[in-house]
Amino acid sequence: MLKWLKKVFIPHKHNDYKPHLFRKAGAILLFSLIVFLFVATISGPIVLNRFDLTALVLPKVLVDYANENRDIENFKHLAISPVLEKAAQLKANDMAEKGYFAHNSPEGKNPWYFFSQAGYSFAYAGENLAVNFTDSVDVSLAWMASPGHRANIMNGNFSEIGIATAEGMYQGRPTVFVVQLFGRPVAKQGTPKTVTPAPKPTTSTGLTQTPSQTVLAESVASEITDQNGNSELYVSVENITAENVATTPDTTYSSFIERIIVSPNKILSSAYFILALIIVIGLILLVFIEIKQQHPRLILIGLGLLIIVIGLWYIYEFVLVSPVLIV
């Protein structure tokens, strides 16, 4: 192994002071690997969508990211609720079919309509949305960077979560809609008291509680708006009869492989960083180990490979990948 590393990286008389890393075969291999990773990263989301892997894997990964973030504040992990998943799927399908991206549908249906349609009676509820993503890490970071979305993820009143995706068109381009729903069921004992909806809030979004949800409540819908008047947080009601949640062991729903599958950006960035580091180390050894034995052609090859790595990473990260949109 040491002999191989010396032959590949270190200039010495046995390799004619020309490390194999930057010789023709080594340079072609590095170039091929750089281009392959770039093409694979671009085509990855297409393959995932074709085989429906995004819908199968992404929700579990995003649940685990949410729970890992909740660990920061020592909140209990959220459990996956099949009923919330159904509600999230109804909302995702609705956005995909009608081509909108908002908490309110074009017909005026607010998030709680889909909770009701799925049969989820909530004491606390919230919704985060995302679109135009290529990487699960990007979605999680975008939500956590927004005060309102972060407040939903870090809300200690929530006990359950449901995430779903749907393919559709938005702003003239194919995309995947992501719906993240949070909830805590009402207590099963007692008779619910119907809450009369509060007057419509005087914000640009104008969201409020609808009569379709019957709950035991002390206060009605509230929301947080950003400086542009866009709604970021939906906590529908605070209920004194919320279901008591037993402490359960922290659960991980996704595997390491599944996280890798839905994180092409992270894969490319990590792989390119490693390749760039290898090239830089090779150049340093080439230039400084035998200063009297310099080979400008090999140095130019190394610099060219480094420029290609940086250039393709920049193109992918800042030209081809659209910013994640969240509401």
Image (cartoon, rainbow, N blue to C red):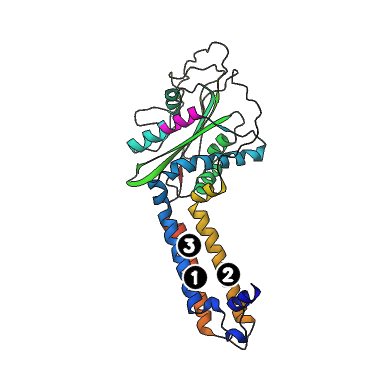
Judging by the rendered image, the residue that carries numbered circle 1 is 30
Q: Distance between the Cα atoms at labels 2 and 1?
A: 10 Å
- Main SS of the magenta part reads helix
Q: Say the numbered circle drawn on residue 75.
A: none
On the picture, is 292 further left or further right than 300? Answer: right
Q: Position of residue 214 (x, y in %)?
A: 48, 17
Q: CB under 8 Å between callouts 2 and 1?
A: no
Judging by the rendered image, the residue that carries numbered circle 3 is 313
Q: Residue at x 42, y 46 (%)?
A: 132
Bounds of the magenta span?
A: 81-89
Residue 314 versus residue 233 in the image, above or below: below
Q: Quadrant of the N terminus?
A: bottom right
Q: Nearer the viewer, residue 167 or 112?
A: 167
Judging by the rendered image, the residue that carries numbered circle 2 is 278
Q: Residue at x 40, y 46 (%)?
A: 51
Say which of marks 2 and 3 sits in front: 2
**Which numbered disc, 2 or 1, marks the residue that appears first in the sequence?**
1
Residue 124 placement: quadrant: top right
Q: Amino acid at mark 3?
A: Trp
Dot 1, crowdedness within 10 Å: few (<14), some or many (≥20)? Answer: some
Q: Distance between the Cα atoms at labels 3 and 1?
A: 15 Å
Q: Is residue 188 visible?
A: yes
Q: Secondary structure under badge 1?
A: helix
**Which numbered disc, 2 or 3, marks the residue that appears first in the sequence?**
2
